[in-house]
Structures are given as C-alpha cells and as structure tokens.
C-alpha cells in the first residue's frame, strides 16, 4: 500500500503538471523514475491511466476517476502533516514566483526584501517574464499578472493598473502641452502596440468615448523602452502609473489631460493554483503581498 500511495502522488503530479518532465522537476527525481512509478501504478491496478503521445498527455476514464480520489487523499495527507508541524515550526523553504518585469523590479522586489526580513527562513525565487506562464507545468507557486487570469487559477486583485498620458518637460516646452484630447493627433506619440490597436488610443470622460488616430514617432513591444523614449523627449506616451509614479514625482515626466481615462484600465492580479493546503511559506507570502499593495497601492496615493 505504501508503494501504491507513492505512485499515486507521482501520478497526481504528472497530471497537474501536464508532463512527466515538469513533474520530475517538481518532485526532484528523474523523468525515468516518474515514468516507472506511473507504469507500476498502472500494473498494480491493472488499468491504463494515461494516454501518452509525443505532444501531450490525456487521462483515460479510469485515470480521471483515480485522479479525483488522489487529489483528495493527498490533500488530506498534506493537511494532516501541516497541522502536526504548524504549531512547532517557523515558515521555511522556497517559494517560486513569476511576475511581469515592469512591475517586478519596481514593486515586487522591494516587497520581497521586506518580506524576507520578517521570514528569513523563506527564500523567494523570482522569475521575470512578459509571457503567460503555466504555473503548474513550469513549477511556479505564485504569479503576478496584468491580464485577467485563466479560470483554473485562484486570483486576488492586488491593485488597479491606471494608464496615464506623460511626456518629458523638454518635449512639452518644445511642442506645447495638449489642452484638449484631440490635440494628441498633432503630437509625436510613443506606442506600445497592445495599448494602441490599429494606431488608436481610446479614452473615456463621463459617458463619452474618444477614439483617436495618433501619429507614432516610435513603436516598441517593451514597456521600459516606451518609458525611456518618453524620458528622452521623443514624444507622448501612455504608460501604467505604477511604472512612472517616481518619474512624475521627480518631475522627469509630466502627466496631463488627467480628466480623461485611458481605455482599457487594467488590474494587477496575484494568481496561484487552487489547493486547500498550500504550505505556510506560500500562504504568508500571499497575505504579505495583499497587505502590501492594498487597499490603496503606494503609486495611487495623492493621484
């Protein structure tokens, strides 16, 4: 029975990670051992649990039934272990986190520094990426994203991601500060393509919507490059406030037409896989980040 339970644990990790390799990495064992454990479990139960192909894995009917029970059994085992040790141990271990670079460097990294002062036995491994990371397949515990999360994830909203129009003092001294939203059509603009579909910027004020075709002086798919171009005086930029708050406070970028709300207004989400028994190191980090950025994040104060 003990060997079968071990095999069930490996099987559940393979299903959750959607691959033998990712499960092996998470369990800290070889891919071949993972494969042997699953095969041994299939032999002991005399059923096929997984349909294997070179591209993906899928559960058989028997595999689906077993996986549902495996999840419950393993959750209960982990819960029992955690309850036994929780009162006696300080949170410790590694938490793997992924975050969007523009937010990670300015806000997540300083938060981690403060967090690890409070919990010195917890090590946070931070990976910065703009792509949508599959938390389960890639072995991450927590993600921070600026787009609506997938329905299979638990999501907690950390903060709104307000967009603002900014330009450098040198650019505005040369070209003048736009007074009407339509004035943007006569200014050099720096584009981030996802915020300017078909070269259009969209705004709302009251119940009215404004869609403007604005000239692109420069276009890049990197938010930091947009900020750098605007700081250098290349043109007007539309950027998240959490990226330019320090620039605005220092006077190196100037916001304007603040009565117009750029569309869409996004949010920053903290996401993780659903699990009733997350380890304490993960739970304390989640609670810390939610408290750190809410209810009003630092970059929104005084705006």
Image (tube, rainbow, N blue to C red):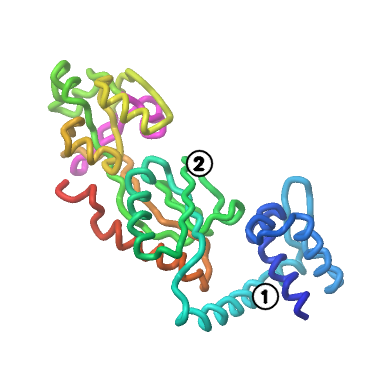
Instruction: Specify the label residue 69 is tagged with.
Output: 1
| Mark 2 or 1, closer to the camera | 2
Q: Earlier in the sequence, mark 2 or mark 1?
A: 1
Of helix, strand and loop, which one carries label 1? helix
Classify residue 101 by image quadrant: top left
Q: Residues within 10 Å of mark 2 (few under 14, many from 20)?
A: few
Residue 256 can be seen, yes or no: no
From the viewer's perspective, is residue 13 above or below residue 212? below
Q: Write the start and end of the magenta stretch as one range.
A: 190-211
Q: Is residue 29 above or below residue 238?
A: below
Residue 49: say if magenta. Answer: no
Which residue is nearer to you in this view: 42 or 257? 42
Q: Residue furthest top?
A: 174
Instruction: Report helix, strand or loop for mark 2.
Output: loop
Residue 156 screen position, x and y as percent: 39, 60
Percent across and percent down for residue 55 are 73, 46
Seen at 51% across and 45% down, the residue is 132
Q: Which residue is mark 2?
A: 131
200 or 112, nearer to the observer? 112
Picture quadrant of residue 13: bottom right
Position of the N terminus by quadrant? bottom right
> At x 65% / y 55%, what residue is drawn?
25
Return the x and y of residue 63 as percentages of the image width and height. Answer: 75, 67
């Amino acid at each position: 029975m003990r060997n079968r339970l071990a095999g069930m644990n490996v099987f559940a990790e393979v299903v959750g990670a959607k691959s033998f390799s990712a499960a092996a990495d998470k369990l800290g064992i070889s891919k071949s051992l993972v494969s042997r454990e699953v095969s041994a479990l299939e032999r002991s139960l005399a059923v096929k649990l997984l349909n294997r192909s070179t591209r993906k894995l899928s559960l058989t009917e028997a595999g689906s039934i077993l996986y549902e029970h495996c999840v419950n059994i393993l959750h209960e085992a982990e819960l029992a272990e955690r309850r036994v040790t929780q009162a006696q141990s300080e949170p410790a271990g590694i938490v793997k986190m992924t975050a969007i670079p523009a937010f990670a460097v300015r806000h997540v990294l300083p938060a981690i520094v403060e967090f690890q002062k409070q919990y010195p036995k917890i090590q946070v491994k931070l990976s910065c990426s703009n792509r949508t990371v599959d938390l389960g397949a890639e072995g991450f515990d927590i993600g921070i994203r600026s787009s609506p999360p997938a329905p299979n994830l638990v999501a907690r909203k950390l903060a709104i991601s307000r967009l603002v129009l900014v330009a450098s003092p040198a650019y505005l001294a040369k070209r003048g500060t736009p007074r009407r939203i339509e004035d943007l059509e006569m200014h050099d603009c720096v584009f981030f393509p996802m915020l300017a579909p078909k070269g259009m910027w969209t705004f709302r004020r009251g119940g009215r919507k404004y869609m403007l075709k604005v000239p692109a002086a420069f276009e890049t798919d990197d938010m930091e490059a947009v900020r750098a171009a605007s700081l250098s005086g290349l043109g007007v930029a539309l950027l998240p406030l959490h990226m330019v708050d320090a620039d605005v406070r220092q006077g190196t970028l100037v916001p304007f037409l603040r009565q117009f709300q750029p569309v869409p207004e996004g949010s920053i989400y903290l996401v993780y896989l659903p699990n009733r028994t997350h380890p304490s190191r993960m739970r304390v980090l989640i609670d810390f980040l939610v408290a750190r950025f809410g209810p009003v994040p630092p970059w929104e104060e005084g705006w």
